[in-house]
Amino acid sequence: MKEWTLEERYRVLESPEDIRDLHERIKKSVYRQKYHVQPVTGLSSDPNGFTKYKDTWHLFYQWCPWGAVHGLKYWYHVTSKDLVRWENAGVGLKPDRDYDNKGCHSGSAISTDEALYFFYTGNHRDENWVRTPYTCAAYLGEDGSPVKLPEPLFGPRDDYSEHQRDPKVIYVPEKRMYYIFIGAQTLDKKGCVQVYRSGELLSGWTFAGQLNVPGYEDFGGMWECPCIGRIGDKDVLLFSPQYTKLPGRSESTNHNVYIIGRMDYDTLTFIPDGEYQHLDFGFDFYAAQLASNVDDPDREIIIGWIGLPDNHYPTEPEEWEGSMSLPRELRIRDGILYQTPLPEMRTLRDGILYTDVPEYDEKTDACADGTISENASDALELPAFGEMELFFDGKDAAFSLFAREDGSGGLTFSYDAEERICTIDRSGMDKRFNEKVGEVLTMPLRTPLKKLRIFIDRSSVELFANDGEETFTTHLYPTERERWFRTAGEIGTTIWQLKASVEDNFVV
Ligand code: FRU
């Protein structure tokens, strides 16, 4: 693994020419994604500034141009009309002020009829490398690039540690106020959320207090990327707690959870309806952000980073890593979030490669329970990027994705019907990574396993179980011989080729 000096990690990007060759090299990688947003060079991590403005979706990602390393962070900008086809739009926010001299860290966006505003953390460090995180703002200028305010909106509070960042801005109509939620750490190292409010977007911000979340006073050492949204008459609080292990999550100390409840802005209390839930049970899902301006009272849209802080991925030697997840639609059913791919994803389907589901109805995405034809195959060649839909009869089942031709290896999935638990194991792959964090994880289901939708891209796999009841996201780097889908038991299968929807072009 390459050792990076501080100078190399924090080098300022002076000109696109500094990374053009790097991009040309990276582009040749067999692991470049075909329909997921990925870094133009270097590393992408958290999604930022996800919002709709004047018929265009804007999304940014935390970007370190130089390689698969966390260093000087920029916001890289991508746009889309349908949340499926994405275009590279160039560098968004650059760390070019004293207040953000060591990075434009994570944040969010909000749009009004007149303008699109960004709120982010200016990561300032002094000559002794002492950090001061500022909450900063910018707006989208005429030429499509952000214009920063001359000064930050506010600095950190000294009754918290240096970890105060990732502003999520929202408008609360009942209060006629804007609110900013900030991920923070108390002086005794407990994760929490600070709340600021103002009647105006670009001025007048005051500290309203620390968010009370009864039962969560000691839940991880830092809550990164907090987010709040409303679905129907419920509020949903999301955040990424760190420095703690959670049951069933192996050795990982980075998580992404949500709580459904009610937000009381008078007392700054989020009253949970029940326990926290994992947003995703996979190995690689973090820092998810709700889109703003979704304009539908019954759903929210979310996107996450396929990756985790502190982890390392096999594309590191190629000088890039990371990817955005698919955007997901969130609805509440039976007290939990149901997460499904956006309906527009179907427009990427480019022909059925295989099906043994005779009664499949594409409009409703349904088939008679466990229907599979007589001549179903137990070894199918997988596309390098495509979609699968699997139907189960609710009994024990097992399959492997990206197995070798003789059936060995691959990402194995097994379902224990009695316990209603899916076990996913990536230790059989040729390219193993983050072994110490864990290579086997479980995804408990609430209802018997009937259906899985699986999205395969060239270096990721996302599973949606039972129409979004639970999800599982992982990076995966199959080698040339790992191409087969093997099943044991009755599994109805349809496999689609998908069209590419991101262009790997150099826009900086
Ligand atoms: C989460 C995070 C944020 C921070 C950003 C820096 O992955 O640590 O808290 O703003 O990444 O890239």
Image: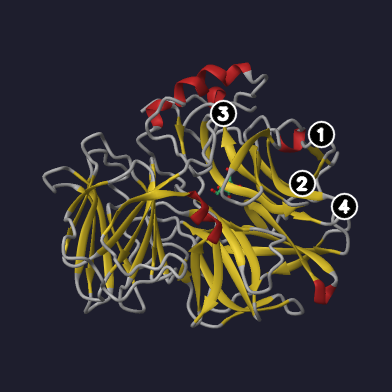
Residue with the mark numbered 1: 143
Query: Of residues 329 and 377, which is closer to you in this image?
Result: 377
Identify the residue under disc 4: 114
Q: Amino acid at mark 3?
A: Asn
Give the Cα separation between the discs numbered 3 and 4: 31 Å
Question: Which quarter of the figure has residue 381?
Answer: top left
Residue for badge 2 = 136
* Separation of marks 3 and 2 at Cα, in angstroms: 30 Å
Quick check: can you spot residue 94?
yes
Instruction: Mark 1 vs mark 2: give the one in front.
Output: 1
Distance between mark 3 and mark 1 Cα atoms: 20 Å
The extreme left residue here reads 406
Mark 4 nearby-residue class (10 Å; few <14, some 14–19, many ≥20): few
Q: Residue at x 59, y 26 (%)?
A: 506
Question: Could you tell which of marks 4 and 1 lies nearer the N-terminus?
Answer: 4
Whichever of labels 3 and 1 marks the residue nearer the N terminus, that label is: 1
Q: Could you tell me residue 58's position as x and y percent?
A: 68, 47
Q: Secondary structure at mark 2?
A: strand
Closer to us: mark 4 or mark 2?
4
Look at label 1 and name its amino acid.
Asp
> Between 447 and 225, which is closer to the camera in this rendering?
447
> Is 168 left, or right, of 252 in this rendering?
right
Where is residue 252? Give x, y as percent: 37, 55
The mark that comes first in sequence, 4 or 2, is 4
- Mark 3 or mark 4: which comes first in sequence? 4
Q: Residue at x 32, y 73 (%)?
A: 450
Q: Which residue is mark 3?
A: 505
In-front residue for pair 484/338: 484
Q: In the rendered structure, which disc, 3 or 2, sits on the residue that comes first in sequence? A: 2
